[in-house]
Image (cartoon, helix red, strand yellow):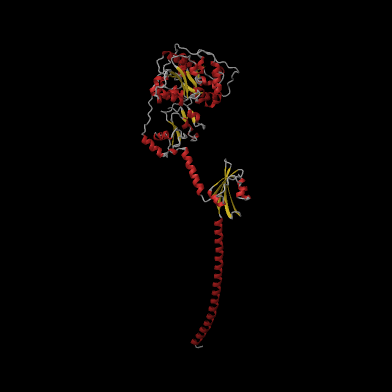
């Protein structure tokens, strides 16, 4: 795989739409990032069209084509008939592109007419069990990769792109041949060694629109050039190939579009239930008019079909005849390796994923796999993350949310913009006495009657606000945290009962005051005792001093 589809990681939103859209499970999701298994990808482009975030890009060869034009090379554009989805006037488009440097512009439908002739030759020969058309490279890859035993029922005929490129090459051997494509798989087809030397590059119709901008001036009544086999312009419409072929009793003509239907068809062939059919197969539902590189023009799909219908009306069908170039193609089975897992391994992985009982096996497909069993196999193959399961994630989230709401000691109210109660947890019911009453739909003011709280709930400028109020009706002091859930028109009010806490604080404050008073009284009494003792000690000391002085006089003999 040469990055025909490129992943833009920084645009990825991990929505898994590409994984769900992939019909071959080539799109994997490991380590929080999507990746493509190149051996299993058939380049149907579903992941490209499914992505709403521009996280997928097509391979672009526009720079090379513009360089050839700047160098003055002979560049011829083969225009797929699905161009009618984008431009109604082929002649006007042709003239504009010539003025921009292209040597010539031809319709790929000329090659498609030769492909139909090759199919008619096969129908007349009547040697094949079934004839599976080979115009769609995505379906060709699917059969070669997964139904290799049926390659002998694929028409040994090249696609209109290769047939037309060879026709141009025979007349312009030195030209650069560019295909204007509605399909990503065509980029790989032109690089297939089996078709080497046919076309040189692909560009998408969207790229061409961006390059031309608004320069194209289309006629009010466009007239396309007529050519032999122009009925082949119907190729990109559902049943378009069959529309080019006259009826023949050798084969029954059956159109099949969409990978899912094509798989049913191939399985039926394997079981021997289908024989004697020419099967027109297209990977895209709606055929090439709904190609992945036309996904930005899907609003014009009907107009494209209408324009083609007008150009192919009353046009002769294709008959047998000589072919101007080599139309032969050889198809081969690629034998993709797919690991085989025992039932024990699969069941063990199912258990590891939490699929332990029938109720746990939901088969919702949200992870990208139709059943939990297929998801388990993908995990064993290393292609899927076992932790990704939307129902389990929702169940875990709901369970965790319920545990938190039911067990938090704080009351929680959910209020809408009309200030009506939407929900109330058990703690709030107990706190406010609503255990036996459903408060849903009641006005907030009737439950928490305080204008300060109502004003805070109405104020949307701050995401979070705080408010405290004593409610006489509940005899409770409640602290509120008001949280505005932006974008959801809801407000969450968290109630914290501070009544007992406040009573305890008041009791402690009273005890502290009483202790201070007792302490002050003890201090005062102690100070009084000290003063009395000091007074007594002072008198005793004075008398002792007088006596001692008298004794000194006696001793000195005075």
Please provide percent x and percent y for residue 144: 40, 24
The residue depicted at 55 percent of the width and 63 percent of the height is 511
Q: Residue furthest front?
A: 436
Q: Is residue 404 left or right of residue 269?
A: right
Give the answer, above or below, for where 521 lies relative to 175.
below
In the picture, which quadrant includes the N terminus?
top left
The residue depicted at 54 percent of the width and 13 percent of the height is 314
What is the quadrant of residue 421 in the picture?
A: top right
Task: Using the image as rendered, state which of residue 118 and residue 268 is in the foreground.
Answer: 268
Give the answer, above or below, for where 419 lies relative to 546.
above
Give the answer, above or below, for where 252 lies relative to 355.
above
What is the quadrant of residue 507 in the picture?
A: bottom right
Please provide percent x and percent y for residue 61: 48, 24
The residue depicted at 53 percent of the width and 76 percent of the height is 533
What is the quadrant of residue 460 in the picture?
A: top right
Please provide percent x and percent y for residue 329: 41, 18
Please provide percent x and percent y for residue 23: 45, 28
Number of numbered labels in the structure image: 0
Q: Is residue 441 left or right of residue 248?
A: right
Can residue 104 be seen here? The reply is no
Q: Residue furthest top?
A: 321
Task: Using the image as rendered, state which of residue 378 and residue 438 is in the foreground.
Answer: 438
């Amino acid at each position: 795989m040469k990055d025909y589809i490129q992943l833009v990681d920084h645009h990825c939103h991990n929505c898994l739409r590409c994984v769900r859209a992939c019909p071959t499970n080539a799109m994997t999701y490991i380590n929080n990032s999507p990746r493509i298994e190149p051996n299993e990808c058939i380049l149907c482009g579903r992941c490209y069209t499914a992505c709403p975030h521009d996280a997928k890009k097509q391979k672009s060869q526009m720079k090379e084509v513009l360089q050839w034009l700047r160098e003055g090379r002979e560049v011829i554009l083969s225009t797929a008939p699905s161009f009618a989805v984008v431009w109604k006037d082929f002649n006007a488009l042709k003239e504009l592109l010539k003025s921009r440097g292209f040597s010539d512009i031809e319709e790929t439908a000329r090659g498609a007419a030769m492909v139909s002739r090759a199919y008619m030759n096969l129908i007349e020969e009547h040697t094949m069990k079934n004839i599976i058309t080979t115009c769609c490279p995505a379906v060709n890859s699917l059969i070669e990769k997964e139904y290799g035993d049926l390659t002998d029922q694929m028409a040994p005929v090249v696609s209109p792109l290769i047939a037309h490129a060879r026709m141009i090459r025979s007349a312009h051997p030195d030209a650069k041949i560019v295909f204007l494509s509605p399909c990503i798989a065509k980029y790989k087809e032109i690089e297939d060694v089996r078709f080497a030397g046919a076309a040189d590059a692909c560009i998408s119709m969207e790229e061409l629109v961006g390059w031309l901008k608004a320069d194209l001036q289309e006629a009010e009544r466009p007239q396309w050039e007529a050519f032999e086999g122009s009925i082949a312009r119907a190729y990109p419409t559902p049943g378009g190939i069959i529309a080019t072929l006259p009826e023949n009793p050798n084969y029954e003509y059956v159109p099949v579009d969409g990978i899912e239907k094509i798989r049913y068809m191939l399985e039926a062939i394997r079981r021997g239930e289908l024989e004697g059919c020419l099967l027109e197969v297209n990977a895209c539902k709606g055929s090439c008019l709904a190609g992945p590189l036309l996904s930005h023009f899907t609003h014009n799909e009907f107009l494209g079909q209408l324009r083609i219908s007008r150009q192919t009306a009353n046009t002769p069908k294709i008959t047998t005849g000589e072919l101007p170039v080599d139309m032969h193609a050889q198809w081969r089975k690629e034998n993709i390796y797919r690991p085989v897992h025992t039932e024990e391994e699969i069941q063990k992985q199912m258990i590891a994923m939490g699929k332990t009982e029938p109720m746990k096996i939901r088969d919702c497909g949200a992870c990208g796999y139709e059943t939990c069993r297929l998801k388990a196999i993908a995990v064993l193959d290393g292609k899927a993350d076992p932790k990704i399961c939307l129902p389990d994630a929702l169940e875990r989230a709901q369970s965790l949310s319920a545990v938190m709401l039911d067990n938090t000691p704080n009351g929680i109210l959910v209020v809408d913009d009309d200030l009506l109660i939407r929900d109330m947890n058990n703690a709030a019911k107990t706190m406010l006495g609503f255990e036996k009453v459903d408060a849903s739909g009641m006005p907030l003011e009737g439950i928490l009657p305080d204008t300060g709280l109502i004003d805070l709930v109405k104020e949307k400028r701050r995401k979070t606000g705080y408010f405290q109020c004593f409610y006489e009706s509940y005899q409770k002091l409640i602290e509120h945290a008001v949280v505005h859930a932006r974008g959801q028109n809801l407000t969450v009010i968290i109630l914290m009962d501070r009544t007992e806490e406040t009573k305890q604080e008041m009791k402690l404050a009273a005890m502290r005051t009483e202790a201070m008073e007792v302490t002050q009284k003890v201090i005062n009494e102690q100070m009084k005792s000290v003063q009395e003792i000091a007074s007594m000690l002072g008198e005793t000391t004075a008398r002792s001093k007088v006596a001692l002085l008298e004794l000194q006089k006696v001793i000195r003999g005075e």
